[in-house]
Image (cartoon, rainbow, N blue to C red):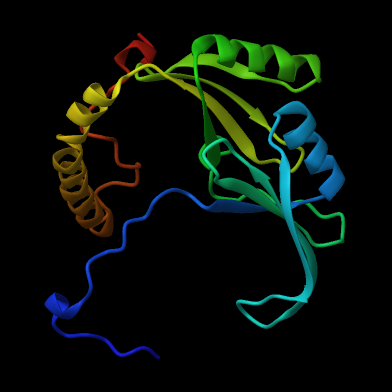
Amino acid sequence: MAAILKDPRALPAPAPIQQLHHFAYRARDAEETRHFYEDILGLPLYHIIQSDVVPSTGEHCPYTHFFFRLQDGSFIAFFDLGDDQASEPSPNTPDWVNHVSFRVDSMQALLDMKARLEAHGVEVLGVTDHHIFHSIYFFDPNGVRLELSAQLADEFQMLEESKTAHARLNEWTALKEQWRKERAAGKTTAPLKPQQNDRPELVKK
C-alpha cells in the first residue's frame, strides 16, 4: 500500500493531462466492430495488442485489444474476449446515459454522417439541438451509444460558461445533501430535481 502524505503541500502539482488517450469497451466481434468504426465512421484501425494474460491484474483472460484513431491522436478501443459475448447494459442506468461523443467540424459534416449511417442501415436519432452544439445519436454493434457533435459555441462563450460551473455544482451538492437527509427521514422517495432547467422548451405544457 502506498504511503499517505499527511501534508498536501508536499504533493507534486498535477501533471498536465493533454487529451484522452483511449476509452475501451468490450466487443462481441472484432471484425464486426472494425467494419463499423473503420468502413462506416472512417476511424482507421491503428494498433492491436493480443495476450493471454491481463497485464494490470495478472489474471488469465485471452483477448485481442484493438484501437481506432481519431484526428487528434486519441483512440477508442475494444476488447474481443473470443467468446462472442457483448457487454450487458447496466441494470440501473438508462440506455441514453453512458455514451461517447465525437466532435465533427461543421453542421454539414454532421448531416453528411447522418446520411452515411442511415445508408448503412444504422438507426440515427436527431439532429438534436443542445444550444451550444448539435448532435446525432446511434448505437454501435456492441450496444455502445455514440454521439456525433457539431460545436456551435466558440471558445469565448465556453469560457463564460465555465465561470459559473463550480457555483452551480455547489448548489446542486447542497440540495443533494438536504435531499439525502429528507430521504433518510422518510420524507421523500422521489429523485432529486436540479435547481435550474436549461431546456425549458422541452417541458411538456
Residue found 60% across the figure and 77% down from its top: 56
Could you tell whether 202 is left or right of 10 in the image?
Answer: right
**Which of the pair 158/174 is nearer the observer?**
158
Q: Quadrant of residue 57?
A: bottom right
Where does residue 205 sit, x and y in percent of width and height?
35, 8
Q: Give the image quarter of residue 185.
A: bottom left
Q: Residue 155: x percent and y percent?
A: 28, 26
Q: Which of the pair 108/25 is nearer the observer?
A: 108
Q: How many marks?
A: 0
Q: Is residue 29 visible?
A: no
Task: Say if 60 sits above or below 39 in the image.
Answer: below
Could you tell me which residue is drawn at 21 percent across and 30 percent down? 159
Where is residue 99? Give x, y as percent: 55, 39
Image quadrant where residue 35 sits: top right
Quadrant location, the N terminus = bottom left
Residue 177 spot, x, y in % from top left: 20, 54
Residue at left 39%, top 51%? 18
Q: Indicate whether 67 appears above or below 34.
A: below
Q: Is residue 172 above or below residue 164?
A: below
Q: Nearer the viewer, residue 101 or 50?
A: 50
201 sits left or right of 39 in the view: left
Of residues 108 and 98, the one drawn nearer to the viewer in this rendering = 108
Can the viewer see residue 119 in this picture?
Answer: yes
111 sits to left or right of 52: left
Q: Residue at 43% x, 48% y: name it.
A: 19
